[in-house]
Image (tube, helix red, strand yellow):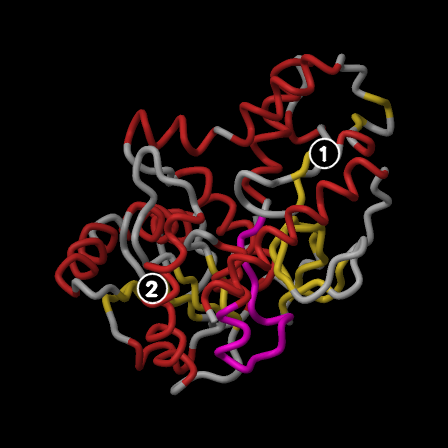
Amino acid sequence: MVNSAALKPSRVVIIGMGAVGTTTGYTLMLRQRSSELVFVDVNHDKATGEMLDMNHGLPFTGGVKVWAGDYSDCKDADIIIITAGASQKPGETRIDLLKKNASIFKEIIERITEVNSHGILLIATNPVDILSYTSWKQSGWPASRVIGSGTLLDSARFRYLIGKNKGIDPRSIHAHIIGEHGDSEVPVWSLANVAGTDLELDEETQQDIFDRTKNAAYEIINAKGATSYAIALALDRIVAAILGNEGSVLNVSTLLEDYNGVSDVYLGVPCVVDRNGVREILPLPLNETEKVAFQASANKLKEQIAGLE
């Protein structure tokens, strides 16, 4: 693992120190992704407590400067991760969160862009695709620098479940979930493979794997109240790709224009991610069923966005 802090001084700000923000901060600290890590929360005492707890572990991990700050600390940030907002409650869909979190985000984006015009916004709050789109609109930044966590986590869940079924390391499974990070997401079975070899799963097994992928967050929330670990690892992976200028292919949410018949909406698709954000959007040759489902996912989100205006 390359310690990016040793290569170039860098700052990551996390706004929102709930379950996702805190776990993301801890993951970034353990992996020493940046030289500076700043926690911002409407409850400053909460951010301070998390900062102190992590700082007391620095003798075991090493060189990351961690502090509880405010929006002025966004000025020199390379990446600003937004996890703030109302959390998803048991029985509540991601779309149910929309109006509550859209209002919260309006103030957050305004305060960030007052002090920073060069960084990358990384959105994790749900519904992540819509909030990424509205953040892009409000910020006035290039779409390449406003990124949603998208279907990176969904694809990881998908690969895990396929790998479990096949008895194969999920890192060796090549499979995508695209579209909304939510109920209308689309499994791309036509391209799923292991080293170019078809998976050979019957339709019933495919449906079971996809249902468990799509409903994973609901299962976790019902069991323990919130998802945190896997999304933190997904955000860490995106941060590593950006700060390390990796050019990694990750299923993040980005602005689409004429992508399988979809335009002017943020959705999760495979993208090349580097120091400048989304460098390139990779085309997927979807079959007709997948293309129709993908377009339906886009239309669903467009309707929700129109409802905000």
Tag 2: residue type? Ile
Residue 72 is left or right of residue 304, and the answer is: left
Q: What residue is rendered at 59% in x and 63% in y? A: 242
Tag 1: residue type? Ala
The span shown in magenta is: 134-150
What mark, if any, has residue 175 been given in the picture?
1
What is the total number of numbered labels drawn onto the structure image? 2
Closer to the N terminus: mark 2 or mark 1?
Answer: 2
Mark 2, residues whose alpha carbon is within 10 Å: few (<14), some, or many (≥20)?
A: many
Foreground residue, 53 or 146?
Answer: 146
Q: Quadrant of residue 289?
A: top right
Mark 1, residues whose alpha carbon is within 10 Å: few (<14), some, or many (≥20)?
A: many
What mark, if any, has residue 45 been given in the picture?
none
Q: What residue is rendered at 31% in x and 48% in y? A: 87
Q: What residue is rendered at 61% in x and 40% in y? A: 185
Q: Locate residue 304, reporting x and y percent.
A: 51, 57
Q: Can you say whether 307 is above or below 206 in the image?
A: below
Q: What residue is rendered at 49% in x and 70% in y? A: 135
Q: Locate residue 151, reporting x and y percent.
A: 59, 45
Q: Can you say whether 219 is above or below 63 in the image?
A: above
Question: What secondary structure is found at the residue carrying circle 2?
Answer: strand
Foreground residue, 238 or 31?
Answer: 238
Q: Name the residue beneath numbered marker 2.
A: 15
Q: Locate residue 194, reporting x and y percent.
A: 79, 26
Does the magenta-highlighted stretch encompass residue 156? no
